[in-house]
Amino acid sequence: MKRQFFLFLILIIVLFNCATDKHVRTIGDDDDANIEIIQVKLLDYQNSKNKGLLMEAENDLKQIEKRGKYNKQYRAKVSGLFGMVYYYKNDKKNVKKYLEEIEYSNKGEEYYYILQALLETNPDAQIMILNQGEREADTNLLIKIELAEIYFAQADYRSAAALYDQALKGLPAAFKQHYQQNRDLAYHYMKNPTDKIGAQDILKENTLTVSHVIGFLHTETNFFDNLAAKKDIRPTDLLKKLKDAGYVYNKKLSEKDICSRKDMAYLLLQILVFIKNDQSLLTKYSDKYLGTGRKSPIPDIKTADYYFDAALILVEREIMSLPDGKNFFPHKTVSGIELSNMVKKLKAQ
């Protein structure tokens, strides 16, 4: 009798567990697609600093939460993405909260190690955490990318290049687009360790001065050779030559001023005109728009702005971009990596 009761009790427990677990979803193709969409939005935010993308990513994650229960593996992934959103919002309290949720759900989640590393300020401590994650996490491609970025910043290009290659083979295409420039630079500087140390420093800058921009263009290209062939020309003297030649619109601009996207566009258009030997590019769009009453196709640029043609032509040729897919943000600046990308595309014209 006791044996029968014991077996009956086990049967009840099993049926109860089945009843409570039948609504718990596992990770499927649709879930993976949702995760990738959110990850791409966070990548785009890194490029544009468009806070709207953070809001979209957060709302997407909240919608996932509403759809029902998921297994612990998927909950940990969602918590990790929430943690990334709050990291970009500089809300460390919420980052730590989601770290605790990941620890409870699945300590093998990549974001468990990535978020811990991001909260650290010492690169050596970050590397130690990420190396542990590379060994212990369920998957580690995102961890490899984070490690590659740290090694790149430390000029350990051999380690960075190897990690970029390992990670980008398995990550979605958006990651390749985002990190390819650093990967290529890592290989370049690995093979040419003494090549243009000043340029390396500029690539690490998030905000560029006029001196940064013209110095990088002068040392990394031959665009200014017709104006100043001497390699030791001072930024002040080079800027004066560029103003005299009409490459710089704002005559009051100094080499210490932050270089805005509008002045960057104007300068790059003059270079494009020189490369293509085509003066018609200078007024290609203003000829079509001025005096017609037509509105600018880019909302935050007016047809009468001195950089109107430059912005439209550079966007058209994909040398510069619309960070949010709509606006040009003429008064913002660019990073060293963004400048390097523009130069690469300009060379290809």
Image (cartoon, rainbow, N blue to C red):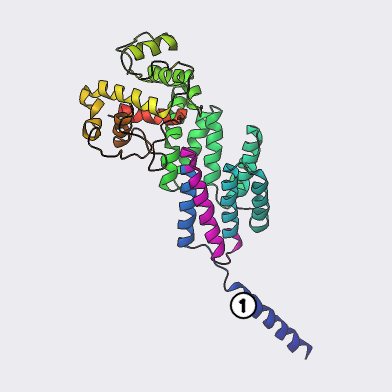
Residue matched to label 1? 19
Up-down: is 132 above or below 73? above
Q: How many marks?
A: 1
Q: Residues within 10 Å of mark 1 (few under 14, many from 20)?
A: few
In the displayed structure, does residue 248 sit left or right of residue 35? Answer: left
* Nearer-the-camera pick, 76 or 92: 92
Q: Quadrant of residue 214?
A: top left
Q: Residue furthest bottom?
A: 1
Report x, y in % for residue 109.
Answer: 60, 52
Residue drawn at x 34%, y 34% is 302
Quarter containing the N terminus? bottom right
**Does residue 257 belong to the magenta stretch?**
no
* Nearer-the-camera pick, 4 or 349: 349
Secondary structure of residue under mark 1:
helix
Residue drawn at x 24%, y 27% is 283
Q: Residue furthest right?
A: 2
Residue range corresponding to the magenta coloring? 45-73
Report x, y in % for residue 66.
Answer: 55, 64
Report x, y in % for residue 215.
Answer: 43, 17
Amino acid type at mark 1:
Ala
In the displayed structure, does residue 5 sit left or right of residue 137? Answer: right
**Does residue 53 belong to the magenta stretch?**
yes
Per the picture, the main secondary structure of the magenta-coloured stretch is helix
Residue drawn at x 46%, y 27% is 336
Up-down: is 257 above or below 332? above
